[in-house]
Amino acid sequence: MVVHHGGCHCKRIRWRAEAPSSVVAWRCNCSDCSMRRNTHFVVPFEKFELLGDSEKFVSSYTFGTHSAKHTFCRVCGITSYYITRSNSGVAITYRCVDPGTLTHVEVKHYDGVNWEKSHNSQVNK
């Protein structure tokens, strides 16, 4: 496990997250993620921390079940993290991790269009 730092483009949102240096990132095809081209890995809530006054620059968007909290910077618009629909942790946009701590990213497809079926198949593995 290593500590990753990252955030949005304008750097008003900054965070740290503890995760392996090699991660599996999910390219989701749900309507929101596909439009943003989001590819993320998930860390437990207790392994994620917003830094400084980042919270005052966070805005969020929900749709459908309103379970996922799609956060973004109110200044630059970048989604560097969000709260997953399954509420299983914080999804980190891997391209928003500062260089130097991710040694390998394996990208897999996640069928967010059929979220219930995809989630159930992941949980039951």
Image (cartoon, rainbow, N blue to C red):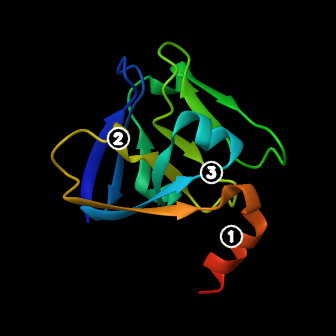
Residue 86 in which image quadrant: bottom right
- What distance separates the C-alpha of mark 1 from that of mark 2? 24 Å
Q: Relative to 114, say whether 28 is above or below.
A: above
**Please, what is the three-letter code of the amino acid marked with disc 2?**
Arg
Q: Relative to 14, say whether 69 is above or below.
A: below
Residue 50 in which image quadrant: top left
Point out residue 96 in the picture as x, y percentages from the top left corner.
Answer: 36, 37
Depth check, front residue: 60 or 115: 115
Work out which residue is located at the far right of the displayed protein and give it: 65
**Please, what is the three-letter code of the amino acid marked with disc 1?**
Ser
Disc 3 element: loop
Q: How many marks?
A: 3
Marks 1,3: beta carbons within 8 A: no
In front: mark 1 or mark 3? Answer: 3
Disc 1 element: helix
Please give the label number shown on residue 118.
1
Q: Which residue is mark 3?
A: 29
Residue at coordinates 29% horizontally, 41% vertically from top-left? 5
**Please, what is the three-letter code of the amino acid marked with disc 3?**
Asn
Looking at the figure, which quarter contains the C terminus? bottom right
Point out residue 106 in the picture as x, y percentages from the top left corner.
Answer: 34, 64
Point out residue 65 in the picture as x, y percentages from the top left corner.
Answer: 84, 48
Q: Residues within 10 Å of mark 1 (few under 14, many from 20)?
A: few
Residue at coordinates 84% horizontally, 44% vertically from top-left? 64
Of the two numbered discs 3 and 2 on the same chain, state the one appearing first in sequence. Answer: 3
Please give the label number shown on residue 95.
2
Residue at coordinates 61% horizontally, 35% vertically from top-left? 35
- What distance separates the C-alpha of mark 1 from that of mark 3? 11 Å
- What distance separates the C-alpha of mark 3 from that of mark 2? 17 Å
